[in-house]
Image (spheres, grey):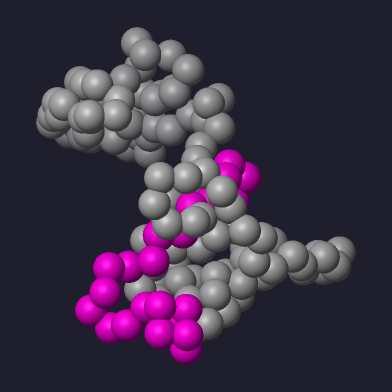
């Protein structure tokens, strides 16, 4: 889908592809994105030096692999994650004298459980005319 410019939520379908049983969703999706970026450039809507094309995926896409497959394009990928998705924080450092293999993962980071979240490194607040106070943390 393509989003209309400006303050609107209208979208326009670009391409629809029926997947065959042996098709890989991520490879097909990368091909579609690659084709859209090519068409944008050919139409003069994206030139070298312009901001990257923002590509937004819904939950269910393999954003990590898509980022790898599209690394040569002027795109930025954003992927929505399921609320039940679990990540792992960094593993604690291995201590000399301990037995067994070092841990590969640290504690769980669950979107649905704020007690598993680390404190944000940075927090900013901005007043907006349309939405009031916006707070961003990272």
What residue range appears in magenta?
40-62
Where is the C terminus found, in terms of image quarters? top left
Is residue 27 rendered to the left or right of residue 134?
right
Where is the N terminus found, in terms of image quarters? bottom right
Residue 50 visible in the picture: yes
Residue 99 visible in the picture: no
Report the residue at 61% width, 72% height from top: 32
Between 26 and 90, the residue placed more toward the observer is 26
Going by the picture, which residue comes out furthest to the top?
A: 115
Where's residue 35, x and y in %?
A: 57, 79
Specify whether residue 78 is painted magenta. Answer: no
Task: Report the magenta stretch's main SS.
Answer: loop
Report the residue at 47% width, 79% height from top: 40
Report the residue at 42% width, 57% height from top: 5
Q: Is residue 79 above or below residue 38?
A: above
Between 109 and 39, the residue placed more toward the observer is 39
User: Residue 2 occupies which quadrant of the picture?
Assistant: bottom right
User: Residue 95 occupies which quadrant of the picture?
Assistant: top left
Where's residue 10, x and y in %?
A: 56, 48
Specify whether residue 54 is painted magenta. Answer: yes
Between 46 and 87, the residue placed more toward the observer is 46
Is residue 18 rendered to the left or right of residue 1?
right
Q: Is residue 19 above or below residue 104?
A: below
């Amino acid at each position: 889908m393509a989003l209309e410019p400006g303050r609107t939520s209208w979208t326009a379908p670009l391409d629809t592809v029926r997947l065959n049983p042996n098709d890989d969703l991520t490879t097909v999706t990368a091909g579609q994105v690659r084709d859209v970026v090519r068409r944008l450039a050919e139409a003069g809507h994206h030139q070298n030096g312009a901001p990257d094309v923002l590509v937004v995926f819904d939950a269910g896409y393999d954003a990590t692999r898509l980022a790898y497959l599209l690394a040569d394009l002027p795109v930025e990928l954003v992927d929505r994650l399921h609320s039940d998705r679990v990540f792992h924080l960094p593993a604690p450092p291995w201590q000399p004298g301990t037995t067994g293999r070092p841990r590969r993962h640290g504690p769980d980071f669950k979107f649905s459980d704020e007690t598993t979240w680390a404190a944000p490194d940075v927090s900013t607040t901005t007043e907006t005319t349309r939405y009031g106070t916006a707070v961003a943390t990272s």
